[in-house]
Amino acid sequence: MISTLRAGLARGGIELKQTLTTPSDLSSYLIPALILFGTIFFQRDAHVPGTSFSLGASTLPGVFGMGIAFGSLLTVAQLLTVEREDGTLLRAKATPNGMGGYLAGKAVLVGGMTGVSLLLQLVPGLFLVEGLHVSATGWLTLLWLVPLGFLATMPLGAVLGSIFDNPRNMALVTLPIFGLVALSGIFYPITGFPGWLQAIGQVFPIYWLGLGMRSVFLPDSMALVELTHSWRHLETFGVLALWTVVGLGLAPAVLRRMARRESGSAVEARRQRAMATVGR
Amino acid sequence: MTLTGELDAGLDVPVDERVIDVRDLRMRYGAKDVLAGVSFTARRGEVLALLGPNGAGKTTTIEILEGFRMRSAGEVRVLGVDPAGAGEHWRARVGVVLQSWRDHGKWRVRELLKHLGTYYAPYSTDEIRRPWPVDDLLDAVGLTAHADQRVMRLSGGQRRRLDVAIGIVGRPELLFLDEPTTGFDPAARREFHDLVHRLTDVDETTILLTTHDLDEAEKLADRIVILNDGLIIADGSADQLSRQVTGLTEVRWTRDGQRFIHAAEDATAFVRQLFLQYGEDIADLEVRRNSLEDTYMKLVLDAEGGER
């Protein structure tokens, strides 16, 4: 068990190093950060309605929160479908304790990748965007919020990645998630929506990660523009913990079912299908 | 030897020496029987080749033995354990080399072998030290010069040798090789055959191999099992098979510049007679037993003819 975990950590570390030294991967970390700061730059004169607080500064923390949910959920789902197709998962299955090591490695890799993109947005954000600062209790909030955010979203990504076995069908996952982002009050305050849309938004982790991040980076007076005029830490913790329980409860069974179906001929069939799609 | 219907192969091997023991294995997809009652065994240190036309059930059989696929019916024991419910300890004693792997493209060769080796370390025993030290392994498969290359930059043959290296990094007692030399050039193929001989001679590794290359089966396998349409239609060494299919051996020679070909029942007696009769006049003598390819074609055609 310990040696499996250690192998998984080593695996995640190696793959994290690989992605950070691959130019095409690096651009996928940098480009979103650049787009984000570009947008904020052009919004620099806009203010949150009714206050003198800059709109850019009020949006940015929510984007950090979305990044955690988005990054860990989608990356896990994507990696699982791609690595099922290229045989990485079958390799793990053919290795003693390989599946455990594989999953631990993925958690480290995706945690690391999301962490790196978060830092790429957070560090310049703290320096460039006026109005963001973190208090001592804010850092404490980050300590539980970020790990809980990973735990709430990564298993869900694993479940989605197990259900879709064709990487080219991933749009079926990404599109609804983009829709969900729109409902989650990241770019546009959730208070502007009708009640039933607010209710849907508050079911999913993205809204709560955004809210939690705003509570860390924005002054407490900004809580007034949120629902119920408070940061609702207890609810944030509760909803994210609930998703963690659901995800961790569901993921092992779904992953096991997926792993059971892996075989040489399954990988070969997917390879043939991929070749046929590329050839078209 | 039977050429049609069920054939039980290798039942004469004592039970405790059977690394693979398959009894009446059946696999059914919908209404189609892919395996219709297959029985065979493999002894420790033996190289067993599984031959047969596409769709004969080779892949299904090997995947059931690898523990990657559930069977419909029958008894299967691999290293004394049913692969359908085998645990990680069993997994550590088995090596698998499949056909189409494109995984770990960003990894470097040495890095990957070292990492995958760590999973086997807890299963090291006094008799079998696991994993295989990386540098020795790289040397054994001829990848030392490419140790620091990324996996995606390897040529087809090098990639295949890496797959074999991964298959044996845990020093398996049983190794599954699914069409191992597809895409190899002749030199790489020769090196691969030497590696297989080394594995079986030095480490007593048992190998189950599928191939379409009959020449390879003849060179590597101690025993050949031919599957057709879900049934075993022949089992034996290449020699036994060819002798039993047709008793005829081809003899070629020249006399006074003229070529002769004769199919002899008893080639030795025939050649003796030839020399007695013509002595020094005989030149360019060749004696050729049926090739495995001839034997294989005849067996498969006979089996299919029997059904029609």
Image (cartoon, coloured by chain):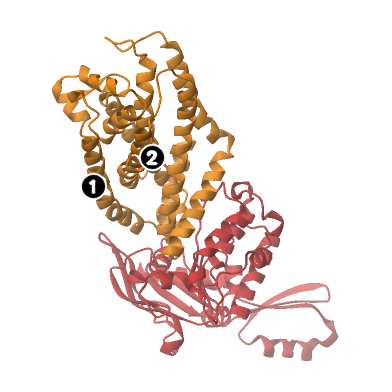
Chain colours: A orange, B red
Residue A76, quarter of picture: top left
Q: Quadrant of the C terminus of chain B?
A: bottom left
Depth order, front residue of A110/A129: A129
Q: Chain of mark 1?
A: A
Instruction: Say which residue label 1 marks.
Output: A246
Chain ID at mark 2: A
Residue A248 relative to residue B264: left or right = left
Label 1 is placed on what type of residue?
Val
Coordinates of residue A219 in the picture (x, y in percent): 33, 22
Percent from the top left, x then y, of residue B22?
A: 38, 78
Residue B124, placed above or below residue A140: below
Judge by depth and name the residue closer to the eye, B251 or B299: B299
Above or below A101: residue B241: below
Question: Regarding mark 2 in the picture, which secondary structure is present there?
Answer: helix
Report which quarter residue A152 is drawn in.
top left
Residue at image mark 2: A72
